Image: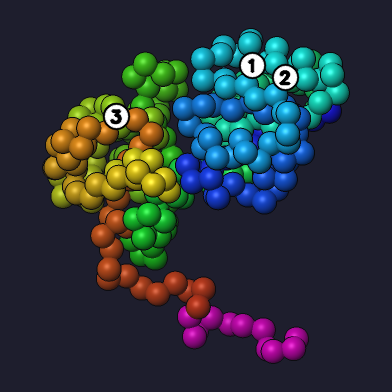
Amino acid sequence: MTVYFIGAGPGAADLITLRGLRRLESSPVCLYAGSLVPRELLASCPAGARLVDTANLTLDEIVAELAAAHDQGLDVARLHSGDPSVFSAVAEQMRRLDALGMPYEVVPGVPAFAAAAASLGRELTVPGVGQTIILTRTSARATPMPEGEDLATLGAGGATMVLHLAVQRIDAVVAELLPSYGPGCPVAVVARASRADEVILRGTLADIAGQVHEAGIRRTAVIVVGRVLSATQFPDSHLYSAERARPCAGS
């Protein structure tokens, strides 16, 4: 028996990986976050599979479901939105499974920030403009941020910043980033990236909060801040440069 922590992707059902889909198709138990994971994916579960929506379950209740499946020798597909490595709450589940001696495997997925960049048609690492991406969030009603990880500190270097779970605090986000990035810094907000009802807002730190309020966006959104969003004049990457030394054909 194995628990498979599967990244279900950012929203579109066909953005799950082939490995993730195969694990889902072969697991007789599936735990999923009903508010985030596309319902279409559940159709890939085996006939008669036990489906458990974890949206309103506590950690103890989720682990109890995993343990019950383990006692029956049943594999579990534990679907998480996006990629399990980022803001997924997988760490505490794996810690519990380690204590119980239950085997698990992590299957990567497409993260929300990657889907947002695709929808924006932008590369987030542009030569000569930005080569660093900070993935972060704000605390608000969630787990407090560690010391030194406030937006003012993180933004001091002006690196491209991607914020998850922060759109409800857009006014505070703007206020904290303005001193480092300036009012003219490009900003984009992508809500429900890759889904049919996706919403894209483009602006600057000076006007993005007003756009977010007008559009009524309050959840399931990614905020991208940085000069890479509007960069057009930049050097070509060294990767494809004619001056880059390359091995001879056939060597």
For label 2, the crowd category at 10 Å Cα-Cα, with few meaning under 14, some 14 to 19 and many 20 or more, is many
Q: Name the residue under label 1.
A: 62
Q: Residue at x 22, y 32 (%)?
A: 216
Q: In which quarter of the image is the C terminus?
A: bottom right
Q: In which quarter of the image is residue 141?
A: top left
Query: What is the C-alpha distance between the residues marked 3 and 2?
Result: 32 Å
Query: What is the C-alpha distance between the residues marked 3 and 1?
Result: 27 Å
Q: Are marks 3 and 2 in contact (CB under 8 Å)?
A: no
**Residue 166: image location, x then y, percent:** 33, 30
Residue 99 covered by magenta stretch:
no
Q: Mark 2 points at which residue?
A: 66
Stretch of the chain drawn in magenta: 241-251
Q: In this view, does 203 lie above or below 32?
A: below
Q: Residue at x 46, y 50 (%)?
A: 114
Q: Quadrant of the N terminus?
A: top right
In the image, what residue type sits under mark 3? Arg
**Residue 226: image location, x then y, percent:** 30, 50
Q: In which quarter of the image is residue 229?
A: bottom left
Please tell me which of labels 3 and 1 falls first in the chain. Answer: 1
Q: Which residue is drawn at 44% across and 72% down?
A: 237
For label 1, the crowd category at 10 Å Cα-Cα, with few meaning under 14, some 14 to 19 and many 20 or more, is some
Q: Mark 3 points at which residue?
A: 218
For label 3, the crowd category at 10 Å Cα-Cα, with few meaning under 14, some 14 to 19 and many 20 or more, is some
Q: Do the residues labelled 2 and 1 touch (CB within 8 Å)?
A: yes
Q: Which of 214 and 89 is in front in this view?
A: 214
